[in-house]
Amino acid sequence: MAKCRVDSMDDLLQTLENAADVDSISEEMLTEGAQVLQKNIREEITSAADRGYATGELASSVIPDTPEKNAFGHYVSVRPVGIDSKGVRNGEKWGYLENGNGGNQKPHPFEDKATKRSEIECTEKMQEVFNRHINI
């Protein structure tokens, strides 16, 4: 939750004016928060895939999309893109690493770990951006 301290009516009006551009502020907040999540997902993938044969291509393919807005609000996704050097889709490798393949490859969950590890740091980063925009 955003926090704001106001000492006078002029300060209140200036703060409200600065906070009026919600779309711009939200986009920047999501961009900076997504970078934290990207870093933690990459680290968790590297740890989960460390079986002696991983090339690091999956971890390096994880990038945040451009923040978007829909009927539910602003959002950003951090996901793997592209294919590896053997032509395998990185999204497919993500799924197999997270869930296993029902055969000989066991699940090595990393999504929850990365998300939980990122929550506080993302929130702090997004709060910093908000504070910067409303000049707290």
Image (tube, rainbow, N blue to C red):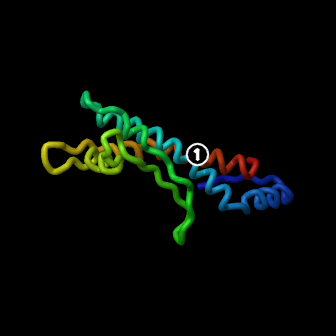
Q: Amino acid at mark 1?
A: Glu
**Residue 86 on image: x %, y %:** 30, 40
Residue designated by label 1:
32
**Residue 132 on image: x %, y %:** 71, 46
Quadrant of the rendering where the N terminus is positioned? bottom right
**Residue 106 on image: x %, y %:** 18, 43
Quarter assignment of residue 60: top left
**Residue 119 on image: x %, y %:** 47, 46
Residue that extends furthest to the left in the rendered view of this protein: 103
Q: Is residue 112 left or right of residue 40?
A: left
| Residue at 29% in and 31% down | 50
Q: Is residue 14 above or below residue 116?
A: below
| Residue at 30% in and 50% down | 92
Residue that extends furthest to the right in the rendered view of this protein: 10
Q: Is residue 111 left or right of residue 72?
A: left
Task: Say what secondary structure mark 1 lies in.
Answer: helix
| Residue at 40% in and 43% down | 114
| Closer to us: 32 or 10 | 32
Asked whether residue 54 is in view, the answer is yes
Residue that extends furthest to the bottom in the rendered view of this protein: 71
| Closer to us: 23 or 80 | 80
| Residue at 30% in and 36% down | 48
User: What is the crowding at mark 1: few (fewer than 14 residues within 10 Å), some, or many (at least 20)?
Assistant: some
